[in-house]
Image (cartoon, rainbow, N blue to C red):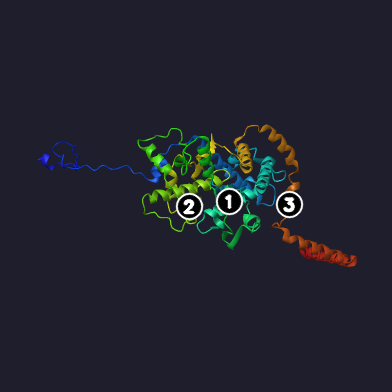
């Protein structure tokens, strides 16, 4: 009876092994997903470009802090106020800890009067920023040439000003390029409205209509004696170290290199996708446009999310990130930090640009100053002590302060006092003394 009264435990469905009695049952095999996200996670990494991306993100944070400091009235800002900018620049550490990591860029000193911690940008960093502005101004014609080539690649010959503003640093354009560049070269550009710029005339027969990859093809054809059939539509392929070459990869790559496509500066009304190999030709044209866009940049790299702003203007109706991951020998995507940066592999060697330009050289000096960290900082402490004595003198640099409204009232009050005669002043003094004596008499009574 006791055995009957015991409750049987809840039974779970048992999984029977695959054997001869259930061999007719088909087992479903899941094919591994091959998406842009899986290719991004399983790609072959380039440690040097990943390290460069991390350092560039730190430099971008430093430049953003310098921009916020420059908006203040004085040449320095208290560290307490800068701690409010932590979420603006996206810092995960304390502001004071971040500033002390780079003494060659930020100088921290106590205020002579208030005795609180203040921060200012070092003289070396300010000199490098002035040098960058001079380099951008010197290479203004090159920047104009880059913008003209971008407008020639556009299907309608127009681009939005906001799209150019997103990559103004990569193109070597100044901050106010709308007034300093677009309005200055009115023979080349025309502002249709406040948000659209149009190319006045196309120069397809000149050097502007030649892509950067064409120079490489001509060099391969003349120096390496390769056939025109092999080099006419080919791209430079530099697979990263450790890339696993699967079976059939070389044959597919060879056929893709020979595949014809519509070049970036060629114009056709209709791009046929439905014919034989139409999708592959369309994707190869998008690869050529992205290759030319990265070649026009001063540092041969750009954020992936900013490439999506050119999809409609350049007629690239494809997934840009997926297309970049399909060609690991041409592009490399670094996912260090919260951003995704794409590099042109052929332009870099050991984390440095092979053919540097003046703007890149100055920005590399900034990066080298950042990488110094806390090394060679003893000399900086001696210089900062000598300059911190006169820091209060530089505090009044103009502008409107919170208590400036009371100064005219006090000035008018002083002018009114000078207009009163001596007899009137004596009468006021006698009146106040008599009033005080009366109050004392009442208190004694």
Element on which disc 1 rests:
loop
Q: If you read the primary sequence from the N terminus, does the residue marked by circle 1 or circle 3 appear first?
A: 1
Cα–Cα gap, marks 1 and 3: 51 Å
Element on which disc 2 rests:
helix
Given the current orientation, which residue lies at the most extreme left position? 1
259 lies above or below 313:
above
Rate crowding at label 1 as few (under 14), some (14 to 19) or many (20 or more) other CA atoms within 10 Å.
few
Rate crowding at label 2 as few (under 14), some (14 to 19) or many (20 or more) other CA atoms within 10 Å.
some
Q: Which label was assigned to residue 443?
A: none
The residue carrying mark 3 is 397
Judged left or right of residue 273, residue 131 is: right
Q: Point out the frontmost of discs 3 and 2.
A: 2
Answer with the quarter of the image where residue 132 lies. top right
Q: Nearer the viewer, residue 168 or 346?
A: 346
Mark 3 and 2 residues: CB-CB less than 8 Å, in contact?
no
Q: Name the residue: 64% across, 55% down.
A: 181
Q: Name the residue: 73% across, 44% down.
A: 391
Q: Point out the frontmost of discs 1 and 3.
A: 1
Residue 366 in the image: x percent, y percent?
62, 40
The residue carrying mark 1 is 206
**How many labels sit on residues?**
3
Answer with the quarter of the image where residue 326 lies. top left
Cα–Cα gap, marks 3 and 2: 43 Å
Cα–Cα gap, marks 1 and 2: 29 Å
414 lies above or below 296:
below
Residue 97 in the image: x percent, y percent?
58, 40
Q: Name the residue: 53% across, 46% down.
A: 294
Q: If you read the primary sequence from the N terminus, does the residue marked by circle 1 or circle 2 appear first?
A: 1
Q: Which label was assigned to residue 308?
A: 2
């Amino acid at each position: 009876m006791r055995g009957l009264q015991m409750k049987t435990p809840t039974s779970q469905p048992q999984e029977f092994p695959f054997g001869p009695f259930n061999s007719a049952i088909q087992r479903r095999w899941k094919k591994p997903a091959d998406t842009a996200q899986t290719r991004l996670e399983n790609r072959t990494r380039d440690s040097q470009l990943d390290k460069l991306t991390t350092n560039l993100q730190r430099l971008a944070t430093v430049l953003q802090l310098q921009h916020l400091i420059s908006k203040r009235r004085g040449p320095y800002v208290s560290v307490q106020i800068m701690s409010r900018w932590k979420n603006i620049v996206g810092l995960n550490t304390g502001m004071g800890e971040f500033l002390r990591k780079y003494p060659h860029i930020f100088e921290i000193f106590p205020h002579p009067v208030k005795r609180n911690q203040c921060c200012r940008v070092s003289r070396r960093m300010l000199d490098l920023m002035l040098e960058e502005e001079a380099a951008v101004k010197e290479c203004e014609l090159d920047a104009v040439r880059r913008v003209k080539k971008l407008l020639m690649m556009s299907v309608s010959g127009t681009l939005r000003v906001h799209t150019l503003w997103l990559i103004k640093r990569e193109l070597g354009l100044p901050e106010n390029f709308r007034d300093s560049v677009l309005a200055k070269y009115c023979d080349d550009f025309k502002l249709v409205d406040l948000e659209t710029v149009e190319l006045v005339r196309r120069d397809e027969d000149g050097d502007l209509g030649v892509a950067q990859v064409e120079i490489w093809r001509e060099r391969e054809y003349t120096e390496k004696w390769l056939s025109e059939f092999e080099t006419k539509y080919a791209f430079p392929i530099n697979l990263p170290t450790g890339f696993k070459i699967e079976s059939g990869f070389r044959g597919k790559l060879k056929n893709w290199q020979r595949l014809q496509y519509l070049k970036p500066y060629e114009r056709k009304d209709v791009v046929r996708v439905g014919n034989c190999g139409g999708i592959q030709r369309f994707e190869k044209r998008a690869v050529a446009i992205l290759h030319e866009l990265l070649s026009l940049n001063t540092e041969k790299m750009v954020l992936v999310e900013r490439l999506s702003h050119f999809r409609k203007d350049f007629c690239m109706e494809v997934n840009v990130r997926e297309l970049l991951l399909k060609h690991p020998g041409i592009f490399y995507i670094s996912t260090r930090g919260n951003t995704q940066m794409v590099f042109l592999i052929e332009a870099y060697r050991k984390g440095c640009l092979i053919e540097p330009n003046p703007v890149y050289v100055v920005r590399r000096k900034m990066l080298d100053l950042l990488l110094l960290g806390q090394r060679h900082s003893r000399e900086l402490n001696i210089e900062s002590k000598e300059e911190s004595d006169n820091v209060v003198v530089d505090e009044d640099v103009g502008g409107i302060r919170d208590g400036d409204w009371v100064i005219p009232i006090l000035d008018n009050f002083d002018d009114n006092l000078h207009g009163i005669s001596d007899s009137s002043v004596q009468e006021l003094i006698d009146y106040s003394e008599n009033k005080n004596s009366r109050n004392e008499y009442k208190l004694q009574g």
